[in-house]
Amino acid sequence: MTIIDGDNLLWALREAFDEREIATEIEMCRVLSRYFASTGEPGQVVFDGAGPADRSEFDTIANPEIIFAGFSRDADSVIEERLKANTSPRRVTVVSSDRRLRKAAAMRKAAGVKSEDFWELVRKELARKKPRKKEPEEKREGLTDGETDQWMEAFGLDE
């Protein structure tokens, strides 16, 4: 499980990587969705505030789970609560350049990763070429004469 400080990661993208094509929360979450689909790992992205009035675009993203902290607390507090509530903290990675969150992760024996370092992992994973499945030989060679006769007979075309 990876828990990401969303605003912190978005800030890092703008500052450290000059990622111009990722300007909004939803654009970043779409990229993260591709990353988590590739790794098979579950993720959560926590943002400050209540989020946009229309969250329909966020509803189309299944993984990572997208959480808005609301008006009464901040994303850091939500992340700390989720970290404390997790029964397997050693399997959790907290992504933030905020020392407070990385320290909270270390106290629970979870991994703490800076936003810039995590984004490098995301970029490398998405750039990796997936091995292609080998095509069956029959696709290139076609059917044998016997197989062709069987299909012709099955469809009543053997006259």
Image: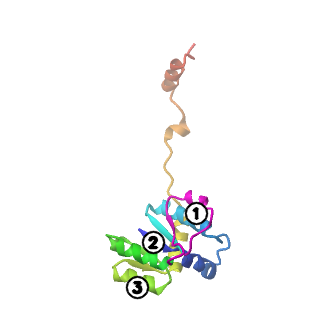
Residue 134 is situated, as x and y percent measured from the top left of the image, at: 49, 48
Looking at the rendering, in which quadrant would you find the N terminus?
bottom left
Question: Is 97 inside the magenta-drawn segment?
Answer: no
Task: Name the residue carrying label 3.
Answer: 103
Q: Check residue 106 in the rendering and tell me which mark sits there, or answer none.
A: none
Residue 20 is situated, as x and y percent measured from the top left of the image, at: 68, 73
Indicate the amino acid at tag 3: Lys
Give the magenta-colored segment's residue range.
Answer: 48-73
**Circle nearer the N terminus (2, 3):** 2
Question: Is 56 inside the magenta-drawn segment?
Answer: yes
The CA distance from mark 2 to mark 1 is 16 Å
Residue 13 visible (yes or no): yes
- Observer-nearest residue: 147 or 5? 5
Q: Secondary structure at mark 2?
A: strand
The CA distance from mark 2 to mark 3 is 14 Å
Q: Residue at x 34, y 79 (%)?
A: 108
Indicate the amino acid at tag 2: Ile
Q: Secondary structure at mark 1?
A: helix
Prevailing secondary structure of the magenta residues? loop
**Circle nearer the N terminus (3, 1):** 1
Task: Name the residue carrying label 1.
Answer: 30
Q: Give yes or no for contact between labels 3 and 1 (Cβ–Cβ under 8 Å).
A: no
